[in-house]
Image (cartoon, rainbow, N blue to C red):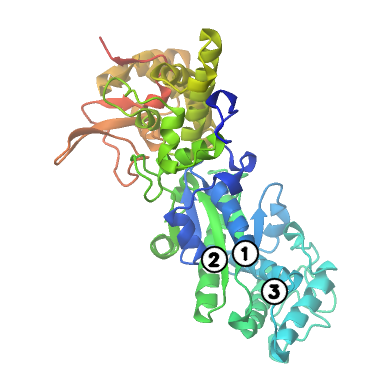
Amino acid sequence: MRNLLSEVESFGGTAAEDDDVERFFVETPAFASLAKGRRHLVVGRKGSGKTALYLAMINSAEREGSLSVGLTFKQYPWAAHLKYASTEVDSTERFVSSWLFLTLVETFSTLIESSGPRLNRDQRKAIDDVSKFLRQNYGTTHLDFKRLFPAGGLRLDKVDVKPEILKNSLGGFSKTRTSESLGATLAKINDWLFKKLEVLGDSIPKVYVLFDELDLGFDPSKSEYSDRVIGLLVAMRIFVSRITRNKIPVHPIVFLRTDIFDLLHFGDKNKIVNAEMVELAWHDQLNHTGASLKHLIDWRIKEELGVENLDDAWDSAFDDQLTRGTQHKFQHMTFRTFLRPRDVIQFANLALTAAQTRASMEAESKDDLRITNLDIKTARVPYSTYFRRELDDEIAAVEPSWQHYLEVLRTVGAAKFTRANYERAFEIAHRKFDLKLSIEDSLSLLYQFSILGFERAVTGAGFIYQFRYLDPSVPFESDASYFYVHRGLKETLGLTETLT
């Protein structure tokens, strides 16, 4: 039975953990490449759908009879993990062995705790050997990954390890716990665990090992944070290379914010980008192909209103009047976003609220209620406030005083302006605030986070406003003729379209 728009609470949550992912998730090419084990790193801006994808992978694994383990790093004991960093390699590689160990142990724990496949004698022995190791060190095979790195080291006694592995160089493995050479210890035990996994081969079910919420504790000024994320990415590449050679169906997937990935510098980065990474990039065309935001919002409307045909969903919630006579309502909305699911869902929910409020005041028939251009315009004000808060969550760790440079834009007074306009406004704002960045650096910061774009000539298209979220490969042109503030900020900054 079809529901009334007046009775719908929302089109879903803007945060995946608060949303009904099982009901609302729309499969994209990114999901397909992860599910098939083709890619192992997901990079996307905050709000682009990484956590929804993480949860959807877990749901999908359960449906298809595969195994998954989701690792989220909230309140993770990094100090304990740090003790197992290697002191014998370059700083950017010091966490590689500890991440490999975590991935291998979680893989085995998941396999052991499942009902398990039919195994031959050698395979059963491999599982039993690892089970003994886990029970000896942790008391169980059902592990809490936040307790994998005991302060006193690890033990190997009563575990079937070949004598050539137990050489004097194997610091940390003995009948008594020791904290000596913990990083070197892990390198040895990782090789042992890999060999046990290779014995199992392709007889095991598919296993996904998922890493999320790695941005918690992000501090661009601390090399330790960068080193451990780089270590994870390098470890992921080593793990994938080894299990792929042996046709073992284990797929680690790392979910990481774009701005964090951009700050990382290490030798294998370009190889990972080309071979392992999928970037979450959505489009706002009016079709349902690829990573379509229109498909995403239409599906949510269909689910909430009980519309039978997906193609009828939009018209069931929005009237058919173009905005300003030329622009589809959907693209009027997306023009004020970073082309992220979170932004589009938030705008749609605010427009829904505006429509319901208007209908209650005008005594409009509940049967005929649809979202109008007036509702879209009303929603722009609270949406702009939301958009500014989202930026604060993203930028504050990089530049705590970033909002001072929004005040420069407020002082300019218009969305479209010249560099001379900005320089004059900068001097005025400088009297009120301690502006630590130069004019040049502040413009670069605003471009980096797509707060402003610049006018750029494009062959065949004339002049366009280039924003970084549309194409991160385009460098900033600080001497451009005109700059333009992102439309999502126009209301919160009180800007006119142009200077009079």
Q: Which of marks 3 and 1 is in front?
A: 1
Expressed as whole percent of the image width and height from the top left, the position of residue 15 reads: 58, 38
| 220 to 166, vertically: above or below | above
Give the residue at x 54% y 65%. 236
Q: Is mark 2 on a helix, strand or loop?
A: helix
Q: Position of residue 201 (x, y in %)?
A: 60, 82
Label 3 – label 1 distance at C-alpha = 13 Å
If the image is split into quadrants, where does the N terminus sit? top right
The residue beneath circle 1 is 99
Distance CA(mark 2)–CA(mark 1): 8 Å
**Can residue 365 be spotted in the picture?**
yes
Q: Which of marks 3 and 2 is nearer the N terminus?
A: 3
**Near-viewer residue (333 or 399):** 333
Identified at 62% across, 56% down, the residue is 59
Disc nearer the start of the sequence (3/1): 1
Q: Is mark 1 on a helix, strand or loop?
A: helix
Which residue is found at the position 78% from the left and 76% from the top?
131
What residue is shown with label 3? 185
Q: What SS does tag 3 mark?
A: helix
Marks 2 and 1 in Cβ contact (< 8 Å): yes
Residue 162 sits above or below residue 14 on the image = below
| Residue behind mark 2 | 236
Q: Is residue 201 left or right of residue 287?
A: right
Query: Which of the 4 image quadrants contains residue 437?
Result: top left
Vertical placement of residue 333 versus 411, above or below: below
